[in-house]
Image (tube, coloured by chain):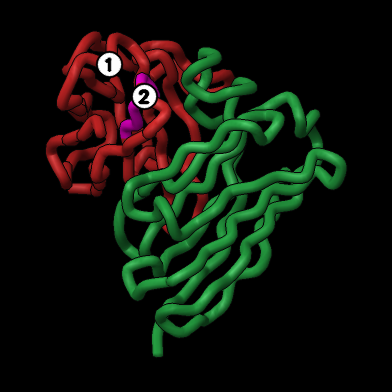
Chain colours: A green, B red
Amino acid sequence: HLVESGGAVVQPGGSLRLSCAASGFTFDDFAMHWVRQPPGKSLEWVALISWGGETAYYADSVKGRFIISRDNTENSLHLQMNRLRPEDTAFYYCVKDIASDGPSSGGGYSDHWGQGALVTVSS
Amino acid sequence: DIQMTQSPSTLSASIGDRVTITCRASQDITFWLAWYQQKPGKAPKLLIYKASRLESGVPPRFSGSGFGTEFTLTISSLQPDDFSTYYCQQYKSSLITFGQGTRLEIK
């Protein structure tokens, strides 16, 4: 079970932190992702973090602005979003990988998704 | 980054039809491809992984095939619940990418 929180309306250039509470599985056994979807548009992968948090990957569109992190003691995943742009407006999904390190450990696809949190970047 | 291109963007079909959706990768991804189904207002649901392996609980009318750069998702006999949007996703690279989606609508 994955539950996102923190979605809000924010002005361009602002910051926002999304969180995801995980339950029902051993959180620190699996890599985690954030995937976003602008309303009415396609899915876009945003970021991946390994099971222990040591390795992270980012889409070019967010690299240098967003930071993915996790707290395995709290079973939580986070996305710190800085210098937000109108094109960052989307539903943000917290997504569980099937393996510990994503593609490098035979995973990279997802068997559980949260219901999404809406982030709107607008003045 | 690896680009994923789906076709068609929209597909109109009837109950009982056999339909095929194609996904092409911009470079060789061997069999590292997944397919998802998404209904309006809902999160995506995994159907197929490793190009052809059916996720547990997914009806056998769904099948996947392909290797390298060209892949297909086939629904052998469309049911009312299948009218949704379908996405392919490559995971050969840690910079994961999705196709733009195929909307399957009732004719």
With respect to residue A55, does A78 lie above or below?
below
Residue at 26% in and 38% down: B99
SS of the residue under disc 1: loop
What label does residue B93 carry, if any?
2
Q: Nearer the viewer, mark 2 or mark 1?
A: 2
- Count of labels in the image: 2
User: In front: B47, or B96?
Assistant: B96
Give x and y (percent) for residue B27.
Answer: 18, 20
Give the chain letter at badge 1: B
With respect to residue B74, does B43 lie above or below?
below
Q: Are marks 2 and 1 on the same chain?
A: yes
Q: Are the residues at dot 2 and dot 1 in contact (C-beta closer than 8 Å)?
A: yes
What label does residue B21 carry, if any?
none
Amino acid, disc 2: Ser
Residue B104 visible at all: no
Give x and y (percent) for residue B75.
Answer: 30, 24
Q: Is residue B73 magenta?
A: no
Q: What is the chief secondary structure element of the magenta stretch?
A: strand
Amino acid, disc 1: Ile
The Cα–Cα distance between marks 2 and 1, rounded to whole angstroms, is 8 Å
Magenta stretch? B88-92
Q: Quadrant of the N terminus of chain A?
A: top right
User: In front: A79, or B71?
Assistant: A79
What label does residue B29 carry, if any?
1
Q: Quadrant of residue B4?
A: top left
Give the chain letter at badge 2: B
Residue at 36% in and 63% down: A38
Give the class, few, some or many, for how many residues have Cα within 10 Å of label 1's Cα (few <14, many ≥20): some
With respect to residue A11, does A45 lie above or below?
above
